[in-house]
Amino acid sequence: MNNPFEIFGGLDVRTEELQEKSVLDAVLDLEGKIIDQYKDGKIFTPNKDHGKIYEILYDSIKESLKEIGLTEKTISQYINARENRTDDYEAVIRGMYSAAILEISCTENPDEEIIIDGCGKIFNYLFYYVKHASNISIQNFKGNHILGHAGNFGGNIKRVSLKNIEGDYTLGTLAENGNAEYLILNQIRGDNTLWYAGSRKGDVKHLVIENITGYNTLCNAAIESGTLKHVYLRKVKGNNTLQVAGCNNGNIEYLNLHTIEGDGTLRDAGNFSGSMKKIILNDVLGYDTLRDIGISNGTVENIFREHEVNEHQKSILSQIQTIVETMHTLSSEEQTKAHDQIARLQIEIFAGEK
């Protein structure tokens, strides 16, 4: 059988060595050897994008660690043993490595909920480019590009919960030409959160965002034939929220904005044959809100502002808010049910007056 690390210049981690170590020691040892080999950045050639590099790393790491079982405990121990403070090639490789072992664990244990508490540590590129993940909860981290490029190019992110994250580009370029099903974000501080999410034929189905501070949240989301289906944003501070979202044949179906503070919200959204179907605006403050929305063959079907909804619709909006406020206390399965309930209620808002 060919050496699984042949592409990495002869790196070799043998099954016998793995059996002599603890699972964590094996994971750390393999990480160190990969970083030593590639921290010079030569693998990052101009004609090879980061996604392709991640796929190479993932396949080789999976082969090398196939004799040991990776679990939620392994992932937590690995993260506890590491920090990632820099922004160099070594940091990118370490971030991809964390993504690979997470993906392996999720693939081997699809029903296991992985809960990671960073206790305030810095970990740039945490789970960078992870392609498939099932049930993950991440809280109390600092760092840029956390879960960056997750679920891209045929990937699928099933359930993700993020809380108390400080850094730029959190979930940036999520599900580009891929899928993301159920996501909750709460207490996120940093710019470019979820920018380009669901772009380029990507699909983000259920998204709840609360307590976000930073510019460009969901900027350029769902462009180029991408889709955002059910989105709820509450207590967002920062300019350019959802600016240019849904353009170039993009599609945003149900969008509920509550307490948004900043200029340029939804500016230039839905343009160039884009589609904005159902929008609710409640306490959205700032200049240039909705400016130039739906131009150049774009379409906007329904926009409701808070003073335009009837009592029945107000009651539904209150129900949604109550659900959102409790979602972070729920198990992953209960969160999924809450997401589905929010989607049904948002559809009901536009179903007609009672």
Image (cartoon, rainbow, N blue to C red):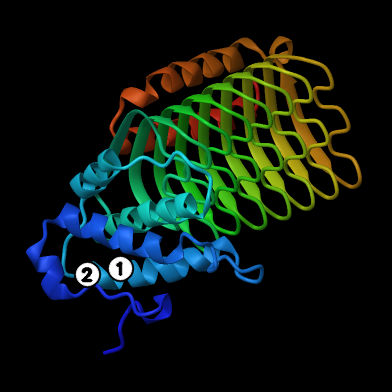
Number of marks present in the image shown: 2
Q: Secondary structure at mark 1?
A: helix
- Residue lying at 79% horizontally and 52% vertically, measured from the top left: 248
Q: Answer left or right for 119 relative to 305.
A: left
Q: Nearer the viewer, residue 41 or 135?
A: 41
Kind of residue at badge 2: Lys
Quickly name the residue at label 2.
66
- Residue lying at 53% horizontally and 44% vertically, measured from the top left: 87
Split into 4 quadrants, where in the image is the C terminus? top right
Residue 170: x and y in percent read: 53, 38
Q: Is residue 351 visible?
A: no
Q: Badges 2 and 1: C-beta atoms under 8 Å apart?
A: yes
Q: Secondary structure at mark 2?
A: loop
Which mark, by number, is residue 251? Answer: none
Instruction: Classify residue 104 by image quadrant.
Output: bottom left
Q: Answer left or right for 309 relative to 40.
A: right
Quickly name the residue at label 1.
62
- Residue lying at 9% horizontally and 67% vertically, measured from the top left: 19
Q: Nearer the viewer, residue 341 or 171?
A: 171
Instruction: Classify residue 59 by image quadrant.
Output: bottom left
